[in-house]
Image: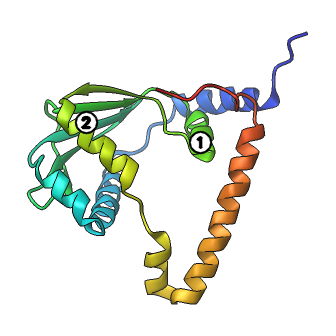
Amino acid sequence: MNMKSPFSAVAEGLAKLGAGLKAPDWLVDETQHRLVLFLNHVLMQEPEAQARLARQQGRVVKLQWGDFWMQLAVTPAGLCERAPAAEPDLLLTVTDATPLGLLKDALRGDKPGVRIEGDVQLAAEVSWLIDHVRWDAEEDLSRLVGDAPAHTLAGIGRAMAQALRQLAARLPGAGKAAHS
């Protein structure tokens, strides 16, 4: 007997609900603006990342997931800025169609499936950034609340993340093979 999981029914319902929704243009614009600020904040804490990106000055990367997309150009300082719609040097398309699938991957610590098209050298630099650059949230938090409270809060956050990873490992489909 083939029983359908209640989680898959919820996922299907969310996918149907999300298919009809479209964020207002102002919200998309502001979200992209904030994302670029955050990316640059993280990059400024990693001089090696900035140096590697600076060598790709003027190159454009288009990130796409379903109907959502964003284009980033590399600045001479090795940071990012939003780029107008044009032919990108590198196209990165997330292949997982559902937000729930992306969330499961994130909770398991897996990278999402991505189709890569375009400049090989730029793709290698982006891959290096993904593998080596991390946001030090505890450091940023310590600037706001001090070292000891930031360390305590970060420990709580790590424990919560570990608990979510363990929960995700028990969800249906958790044993699937890693994405390419």
Residue 178's label in the rendered image is none
Which residue was labeled with disc 2? Answer: 123
In this rendering, the answer to whether 22 lies above or below 3 is below
Q: CA distance from mark 2 to mark 1?
A: 24 Å
- Point out the tag, 2 or 1, that comes first from the N-terminus: 1
The image shows residue 155 at horizontal and vertical percentages of 64, 72
Rendered image quadrant of residue 61: top left
In this rendering, the answer to whether 49 lies above or below 173 is below
Q: Residue at x 17, y 45 (%)?
A: 83
Q: Secondary structure at mark 2?
A: helix
In this rendering, the answer to whether 8 lies above or below 47 is above
Which residue was labeled with disc 1? Answer: 103
Along the viewing direction, whichever of 161 and 31 lies nearer the viewer = 161
- The three-letter code of the residue at mark 2 reads Ala
Q: Residue at x 32, y 52 (%)?
A: 32
Rendered image quadrant of residue 3: top right
Left or right: where 148 falls relative to 82: right
Along the viewing direction, whichever of 65 and 109 lies nearer the viewer = 109
The image shows residue 46 at horizontal and vertical percentages of 29, 65
The reply to whether callout 2 and callout 1 are in contact (CB within 8 Å) is no
The image shows residue 114 at horizontal and vertical percentages of 40, 30
**Can see residue 27?**
no
Rendered image quadrant of residue 158: bottom right
The image shows residue 7 at horizontal and vertical percentages of 76, 32
Crowding around mark 2 (Cα neighbors within 10 Å: few <14, some 14 to 19, many 20+) is some
Q: Quadrant of the N terminus?
A: top right
* Colour scheme shown: rainbow
